[in-house]
Image: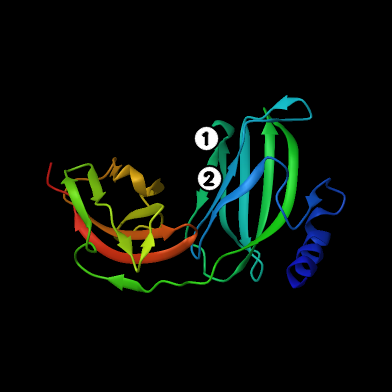
Amino acid sequence: MQQLFWLIFFAFFVALGSGITIGMTLPQHFRWSRVGPRSIQLSWDDHKIRGLSIHFINLIVSSLDTKVPQFSGDVEFSDGSVVVDGLQPDTVYLVRLSAYAGGMEVLDHLSTIKTLKDESVTTRGMTLPQHFGWSRVGSRSIQLSWDDHKIRGFSLHFINLIVQKKGATAPQFSEMVEFSDGSVTVDGLQPDTMYDVRLSAYAGSMEVLDHISIFKTLKD
């Protein structure tokens, strides 16, 4: 109820007369395909709104406390999903979801989402955790691989990898992949450069591994 109160209170100021819809859940055809302590994934199926084909999805995720956007961006409707990283555990966020057919806005919806509590312990080290390894390190690309295993008795479903150049303000790479894929490749890196790596593993929506390490690409 407290979520709904703040949602309506805030929406009164930002959405009065704008045609925005408000709800505790997402509109039809949209869903949270993953909700973790630090990241969420919004997915949608192929559909039309008012008979119009959708081209872009705009998503804004903001802290209820500061109203400052944590994430704001457009994604192609054909992508089918978008991942938002860098969130705080056990925190309520305001979500504004818009859909566009060409340049015309056909959906504008306001709701909230609460991240899960952090059940994992962040570890740090110069190397990767057991069962994970760099199967290829080049000058401009790397490949992370892993073998089939469990963590704390849990079967894994997703691996989330964030690679960020040291001193940079935004990740160079951020992607969630199926654990069954066995590996993920990161391209577009710079030669002879240090990068921070954040590796997270999920059993369903529960984060069971969160590890921070570093690596250096080879000289060109």
Residue 115: percent from left, percent from top: 57, 65
Determine whether the residue tagged by mark 1 lies in a helix, strand or loop. helix
Q: Amino acid at mark 1?
A: Asp
User: Could you tell me which secondary element the residue under label 2 belongs to?
Assistant: strand
x and y percentages locating residue 109 in the rendered image: 74, 48
* Residue at 33 percent of width and 43 percent of height: 181
Q: Which residue is at 33% across, 59% downward? A: 199
Q: Is residue 151 left or right of residue 9?
A: left
Q: Is the C-beta separation of discs 2 and 1 under 8 Å?
A: yes
> Does residue 220 appear to the left or right of 7 in the view shown?
left
Specify the quadrant that holds the C terminus.
top left
Residue at 35 percent of width and 66 percent of height: 153
Residue at the disc numbered 2: 82
Q: 91 or 74: nearer the eye?
A: 91
Callout 2 amino acid: Val
Q: Residues within 10 Å of mark 2 (few under 14, many from 20)?
A: many
Residue 167 visible somewhere in the drawing = no
Q: Which residue is mark 1?
A: 79
Q: Which mark is residue 18?
A: none
Residue 76 sits above or below residue 86 on the image: above
Q: Is residue 106 above or below residue 154?
A: above
Decide: is 109 above or below 75.
below
Question: Is disc 1 surrounded by few (<14), some (14 to 19) or many (20+) residues within 10 Å?
Answer: few
